[in-house]
Image (cartoon, rainbow, N blue to C red):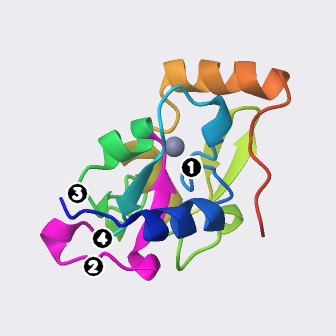
Amino acid sequence: MTYIPESLRRQVVERANGCCEYCLLPQDVSLYTHEVDHIIAEKHRGETVLENLCLACLDCNRAKGSDFGSFDVETGEITLLYNPRQQAWDDHFRLEGSRIIPLSPEGRVTVFVLKLNDEIRVRAHQALLEAGKYPAKRES
Ligand SMILES: [Zn+2]
């Protein structure tokens, strides 16, 4: 894994407003430090540049690993994961309570691969939602 210089990490965190760019979990309510994710993993020649980096919580980043796509159950097609640098979250997902509802093939494979609606995560996000701490405010 390539070392990510502190200045680059700071830019990624600021751009994401301190929130996971996949599940919208704010850093300040997370037990673990959000990580800088290579959207296209280095294994697949993804570069360590701002355009290929995003902020991801530990759960999202661990579930994603070096994956960049999967089979979409509805279309049967190999589909790329949601790309926070090239796509708008609201075009691919919406929140229903603390559950993340996919709106596109990219949304569906991302919810599946990143396990966004694992029951334990939905319950944790629900508690934060009720406390007014989820989702984080995002720039649109
Ligand atoms: Zn996340």
| Disc number placed over residue 47 in the picture, else none | 2
Residue shown at 78% from the left, 70% from the top: 140
Position of residue 116 measured from the top left corner of the image (x, y, whole percent): 50, 39
Q: What kind of residue is marked 1?
A: Cys
- For mark 4, what is the residue? 40
- For mark 1, what is the residue? 20
In space, the residues marked 2 and 1 are separated at their CA atoms by 20 Å
Classify 50 as above or below 128.
below
Q: What kind of residue is marked 3?
A: Ser
Secondary element under disc 1, as helix, strand or loop, is loop
The answer, for residue 25, to whether it is visible in the render is: no
Pair 2/4: label in front: 2
Q: What kind of residue is marked 2?
A: Glu
| Residue 139 relative to residue 19: left or right | right
Pair 1/3: label in front: 1
**Within 8 Å of ligand 1, the CB of disc 1?**
yes
Q: Earlier in the sequence, mark 2 or mark 4?
A: 4
Q: Earlier in the sequence, mark 3 or mark 2?
A: 2
Residue shown at 36% from the left, 67% from the top: 5
Mark 1: give few (<14), some (14-19) or many (20+) Cα within 10 Å: many
Extent of the magenta region: 40-57
Residue shown at 75% from the left, 36% from the top: 134
Q: Which of marks 4 and 3 is nearer the N terminus?
A: 4
Position of residue 12 measured from the top left corner of the image (x, y, whole percent): 53, 66
Q: Earlier in the sequence, mark 1 or mark 4?
A: 1
Classify 137 as above or below 122.
below
* Residue 43 lies in the magenta-colored region: yes
In space, the residues marked 3 and 2 are separated at their CA atoms by 13 Å
* Residue 50 lies in the magenta-colored region: yes
Pair 3/2: label in front: 2
Residue shown at 31% from the left, 62% from the top: 69
- For mark 3, what is the residue? 66
